[in-house]
Every structure is written in structure tokens, then in C-alpha cells.
Amino acid sequence: MECEICGSEAVISTNNGTLCAEHFKQRFEEITLSTIKRYGLIKKGERIAVANSGGKDSLSLLYILSKYFKKSNEIVSITIDEGIKGYRDKTIEIMKDYCNKYEVEYKIYSYKDFAGRTMDSITKTRTGIPCSACGVLRRYLINYAASEVHADKVATAHNMDDEAENVIMNLVQNDIDKMVRLGAYSGIIKEKGFVPRIKPFLFLNEKETMLFSMLNGINAIHTPCPYAGMGFRGLISRKIKQMETEFTGSKRNVINAMLEIKKGYSADSGIKMNKCRYCGFPSANDICEACKLKEELVKSPVV
Amino acid sequence: MEIKLNNINFGEKTVKIESNSVTELLEKLSLNDDSVILVGKDGKIYTKDQSIREGDEINVVEVFSGG
């Protein structure tokens, strides 16, 4: 395949184009910036927290946001340490090196500090797939961390694959209310205590994100979380990649369909918010999911 | 033709393919083009339509969620 711009040898061919290394890097940045512009994700002067695991996606996001918004905005990196030995400890070192090198302020928040347990410990006593507990704690701590660093918005490196997985999972579970909270500007609920989440990589494939980090020499370890790939999400993830290989553009179509459905929902369409009795952060219930889980973990034996 | 592969999960192995095509290699490994990046020893990135040469050494980098 030849690059559609210059005719030299292509390194990738996706629904975003068939491109050589240089034009791919350029296109990747253009798509990120156009997503930010189209959805008004970042306004001048806003303090943006980047949810940064030290992995390929979040370092690529930090790279682009620092490159284009460091002069007009404050960028701060927030990291959630799940406590996964041999994995997160390594990416945290990479994150620190990157932030120190490019002079980005960073803060780390851990499951251990919040719930008294690491993810490794949780998996030893809790049944079910690790991702469900991990997701609850991570989402909570990202919002908590973003609030604590006084961020106006929190940018996550969720890409097209992640979002298409979420859409399909919500559809299969018949959870349309949850699905319409997806999108580049995540959350249709306007509530004090919720830091809006933005996804500048929404229209970029996982493969593109990975290649971008490799071509830019972003020193990320290219290994997945040891607990990933299990359960329903793992199945959907594999099927989506198979679908995309056979029908290019499938993931984009899934996201476009979700965005169309979302248009019909308004910011207050039936979702009532309370404050969690324990932590005071917004919650659909009397006690938020993270505090419920924390309560459960405190009662179970520490391993 | 024999191709040397390296991958974080299966380590090093040699596979035989009939043609010189990346598509055949991916089929042999039961991998989708969307789920993998094939990187040559010299840093060359193989797209699915490209040809592989006898003796090529390829790092099979699997695309994964997260990070």
C-alpha cells in the first residue's frame, strides 16, 4: 500500500487513511485536534487533568496536549495506582520519567490509600472478573483526583475501540441511559462534584494509538494489564477487532450510531443525582458504588 | 518459506507459510489485522498487503486495550 498523500510506503491503513509514518503522525494529531475543536473539549485557560497511567495511550495524549495546549492551558497529570505488581509499578516509573522530562506536574492516587487494598489483593478475595471492581474504583478516583487538583476537565485516552466496546456492552445489557453518557464530552449530567471527562482520541483506533506511541518513541511498555481480556469486555474487544478487519469502518459506525441516539437525550433526562452519604460526591444512590465496594473490602480479609 | 517471529506471549518461534503474504501469516497466527502491528528487525512496519522475504524476523506486537 502507498501513502495516499505522498505515495511512499504506507505503515497503516484504517478508516482514517492509508498513510506513511510521517503523514500518519500528522493525521493522528489533526484528528485529535479536530475532535477537541468540534466538541469544544478544551477552552483557553482551563486547567486540564490528564488521566495518565504511563501507558501508550495516555502518554500519547499527554504528548499532544502538552505540544498544543501548554501555552494556553494548565496541564496536570493524574495517575491511579491500582497496585498491580510487575505492571503498574513499571508504568508509573515511565510516567514519572516522562513528566519530569517535560516538566508536567503529576499526582498519584492509589487504591491502597482509598480502599486499603491493592488490586492484587482484591483479586485474591473477591470473586468475579477483576475489571468490574477495578473500573468502579478507577472511575471514582479519577474524578476524585481531578477535583482535588482543581481541574476544569479530565482528559482520558479512551479511543474508538474502547468506546465501541462500551456502546456494544451497554446495548447488550439494554442500558441506554448509560450509553448516552458516552461520547467525546462524557456525561450528560451537570452536577457539582463531577469533573467533565473529555476523550480527544474518540475517533482514533487502538492500533493507531499504539503505532503513534511507537513512531514517536514514547517509552511505553507494550504489554497489557495482567487482568485484562477476561469476561464480557474481553469477548467484545476481540469481536470488534475481528469485525473491523473484515468490515473497515465498523467501529466508527458503532460510535456514530451512539452519537445519533445521544442527540435525543437532554442533560437531565431522568437521571436524578444524590450525594453519597460517605464521601459526598455525586451518586445515583444513597451510597456511591466506590464507597459500597470500599465497605465490602474493609470487611473482607486482607491477603 | 520460514519466518522468525517474536511475541511477548508466545516468545520466539518459526512459522512456515506457503506464499510471501502478511495476510497468510496473520491467518496462520489466528490474528486480525486490526489487533496487531508487525515490526521488522530494521523497524519496518508491515501492512497486510506487503510481502515478506525468506529469513525476515518479525516482532508481533499485539494491540491491547488500556494504557
Image (cartoon, coloured by chain):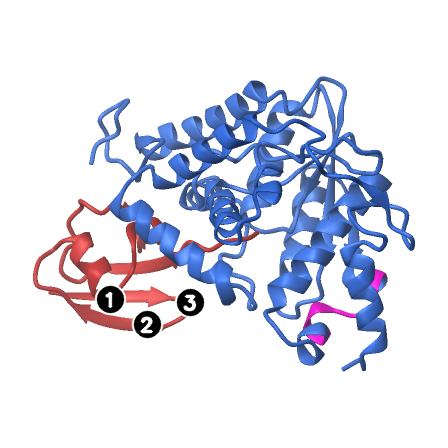
| Rendered location of residue B46, percent (x, y) | 26, 48
Disc 2 from disc 1: Cα separation: 7 Å
Query: Which residue does the numbered mark 1 point to in the structure image?
Result: B4
CA neighbours of label 3 inside 10 A, class few (<14), some (14 to 19), many (20+): few
**Residue A117 is a magenta residue:** yes
Q: Nearer the viewer, mark 3 or mark 1?
A: 3
Q: Position of residue A106 (x, y in %)?
A: 77, 44
Chain identity of mark 2: B
- Whether residue B37 can be seen here: no
The reply to whether residue A82 is in sight is yes
**First to last magenta residue range:** A114-121
- Subunit ID for the residue under disc 1: B
Label 3 amino acid? Ile
Residue to which mark 2 is pinned? B12
Which of the marked residues, 2 or 1, is nearer the chain's N terminus? 1
Q: Secondary structure under badge 2?
A: strand
Supply the letter of whichever chain is red.
B
Pointer 1: residues within 10 angstroms few (<14), some, or many (20+)?
some
- Give the image location of residue A24, x and y in percent: 38, 32
Instruction: Give the colour in which the image draws chain A.
Output: blue
Residue under pointer 3: B8
The three-letter amino acid code for the residue at tag 2 is Glu
- Given contact means CB atoms under 8 Å apart, are the residues at marks 2 and 1 in contact? yes
Q: Nearer the viewer, residue A252 or B34?
A: A252
Q: Residue at the location (70% across, 68% down)?
A: A119
The number of callouts visible is 3
- CA separation in Å, label 3 and label 1: 14 Å
